[in-house]
Amino acid sequence: MTKKMDNLLDSLIVPPGKQIDLRNDYDPGHIGHFMSKEDAGEAIAAGISLLSLQQDKLYAQDTYALLIIFQAMDAAGKDSTIKHVMSGVNPQGVQVTSFKVPSVEELDHDYLWRNCIALPRRGDIGIFNRSYYEEVLVVRVHPEFLDRQHLPPQLRDRNIWTRRFEEINNFEKYLADNGIIVLKFFLYVSKEEQKKRFLQRVDEPDKNWKFSAADIRERACFEDYMDSYEDMFNHTSTIHAPWYIIPADHKWFTRLAVVSVIHRTLDRLHLAYPTVTSEEKEALLKAKAEMENESEGPGSTRKEEKRSGGKKA
Ligand code: ATP
Ligand code: MG
């Protein structure tokens, strides 16, 4: 990775312990030193194929897990980013979980429960399409959601958000201490670009299914969401689980930034295939020799048949 790219990715991190001003410090239309989609094409393709190699090692090594969290306003491109960035990886080692409005069963548990049971196993990549962060975003913008959470009344005070930030930080520290690497991406789309994409969803029949009236209701709260996001970043970007604010007005840039951050994060783990001991190596060579010396048994019949034109002697 070039120094320029490294610096670009660093500039997307919410510095742990610092207070950011989302609207002034970050630009949804940012494209770094890239000129266009074409200019970035090679880097995106390279990132996707490197990720595939890294995932193979992650899986074989069976030591770390990677948890990737996506949060965003509607139409910011979560789904298409996941689809493109993960297009080269072995589906056996990746699980995507989309968190929707909690079900009755989920509401009968603490809010981390449904997330815990979806955590990736060692060797795997787990993707959370939305996550427990909704608990300090949508629930904060619409506090009436708390009514359904069966919380003891004394725990529904105005400190609930600060407590949740703390609980989330502790949870992520616990994950990090267990070898689960947590990456958090906020796809930052502007209100104007969201409108453009919503209009496309209305105008293009093939995209109609992606649009719902609820999207417009949430759009009306856009600024409240930005306030909640900002407070969330300022409380939950930590050394062990930093937030990345990914400019999302240009989908190609979103893909480039996300794949590059994942690639860089895995690179820093120095992943490697497991090595075998000399005894194990000896056993492998012995097995190889046995296979090479196998006598032509029943398994070779078909080969024999083929050689003799399918006719048995
Ligand atoms: P898309 O619209 O691209 O299909 P989406 O992630 O927006 O994907 P939807 O089914 O439209 O999926 O929306 C899911 C909704 O569930 C979002 O509005 C989100 O805020 C809401 N949600 C997720 N988690 C919670 C939660 N813990 N409490 C309340 N609402 C939640
Ligand atoms: Mg939606």
Image (spheres, helix red, strand yellow):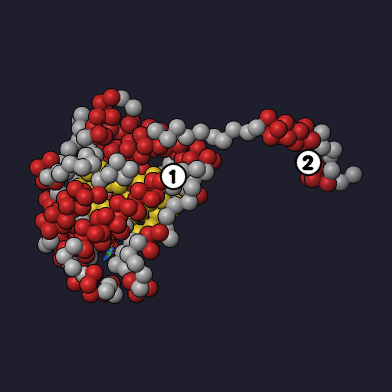
Side of 196 where 128 appears, left or right = right
Q: Which residue lies furthest to the front in this view?
A: 154
Q: Position of residue 152 (x, y in %)?
A: 27, 74
Q: Mark 1 points at which residue?
A: 179
Front residue (pair 309, 92): 92
Label 1 element class: loop
Q: Quadrant of ligand 1?
A: bottom left
Q: Is residue 225 above or below residue 13?
A: below
Residue at (17% x, 41% y) in the render:
18
Q: Name the residue under label 2.
A: 303
Q: Can residue 217 be seen in this view?
A: yes
CB at disc 2 and ligand 1 closer than 8 Å: no
Residue at (48% x, 51% y) in the render:
121
Q: Which residue lies furthest to the top in this view?
A: 3
Q: Position of residue 290 (x, y in %)?
A: 79, 35
Residue at (40% x, 33% y) in the render:
267
Q: Where is residue 108 in the image (x, y as percent from the top left)?
A: 35, 73
